[in-house]
Structure formats: C-alpha cells, structure tokens
Image (tube, grey):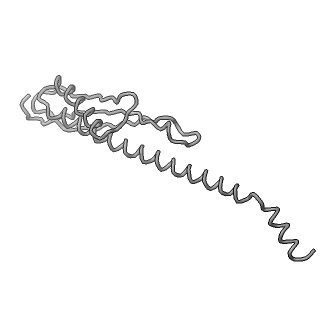
Amino acid sequence: MNRRGRGAAVRRAERGSAAIEAVIGITAFVALGSMIIAGGRIAITQQAVEAAAAEAARSASISRDAGTAAVVARDRGLASLENQEVPCLPVPTVVVEVPVVPLGVSANARATVTCRVDLSDVAIPNFPGSMTIERTMESPIDAYRQR
C-alpha cells in the first residue's frame, strides 16, 4: 500500500468523530453555564434573605412595644425581599421574636427569614428543583429606652 492509500484509510476511520466531540463539548459547556446560573441565583437569594432578616430585626428592636414590633418587623422583612425582587416560592416567611423585658435589662430582637428559591429551570441532572434558604439576624434592644 502506498502512502496515499494509508492516509485515506485513517481519514475514513475518523469520519464522524468531530460531531461526537462537538456534542460532548456543547453538553459540558451547557452544564457549566447552568451551574454558574444556579450558583449566582442561590448567592443573590442568600444575600437578599440575610438583608431582609437584618432589616426585620432592626425594625423590631426600635419599636416601642413587642406587640407592634412583630407586625412592623414582618412587614419590613417582606418589603425588603420585594424591593430586591427576590422570587420566593410560594411566599417567604418572616418570624420575629421580641422578648418582653423590664427596663434596664438588655435583650435582642431576633428575625428569621425563609425563602425557597426556584431552580427547576436550571438544566443540571440530579440538581434539586428548589432550595430553601433561611437566615436569622439579631438586633439589640436598648435597655433604657422608654417602653
């Protein structure tokens, strides 16, 4: 067999391998892109939930009484998530704890915000369709504030 014949035989044996390589490369690229999108969505939601918890805890700590503190803090936490346009499934929850203590005793107001972020549109095999993110923040209540 001459040189020309052997080269042609090798080229015929490799026919179609470029298509297979392209499919593998595109699949890996799409998976990497999907992981980046999911990671970004999770990180942004974590930051927004933490900010909402801090806002709720701060609002509770500066309220004059524990009864209105919980209502105001819950509203402020939900408004913070809404302002940051965080899509929580189905609705985020804000739980506020404001201890009732006598004048001169220090305490902390605590707010816990929970948000379930949707990841169903991210095409990653074995990846959950949603993820629950929860953050708790505290804010000190002034021990000598008029109550």
Estimate the x, y position of residue 46 in percent, counting from the top left. Answer: 37, 42
Estimate the x, y position of residue 61 in percent, counting from the top left. Answer: 17, 34
Query: Count the marks: how many?
Result: 0
Residue at the image position 21 percent from the left and 26 percent from the top: 70
Q: Quadrant of residue 137?
A: top left
Residue at the image position 16 percent from the left and 35 percent from the top: 141
Find the residue positioned furthest to the left: 146
Q: Point out the image quarter for the C terminus.
A: top left
Q: Quadrant of residue 116?
A: top left
Find the residue positioned furthest to the right: 1
- 22 or 144, nearer to the observer: 22
Q: Is residue 3 left or right of residue 64?
A: right
Q: Point out the image quarter for the N terminus.
A: bottom right
Estimate the x, y position of residue 8 in percent, counting from the top left. Answer: 84, 69
In this picture, is 102 found above or below 7?
above
In this picture, is 15 found above or below 54?
below
- 24 or 110, nearer to the observer: 24
Q: Quadrant of residue 67?
A: top left
Q: Is residue 61 left or right of residue 126?
A: left
Residue at the image position 50 percent from the left and 38 percent from the top: 121
- 56 or 137, nearer to the observer: 56
Estimate the x, y position of residue 146 in percent, counting from the top left. Answer: 6, 31
- 51 or 40, nearer to the observer: 40
Find the residue positioned furthest to the bottom: 3
Q: Is residue 89 left or right of residue 108?
A: right
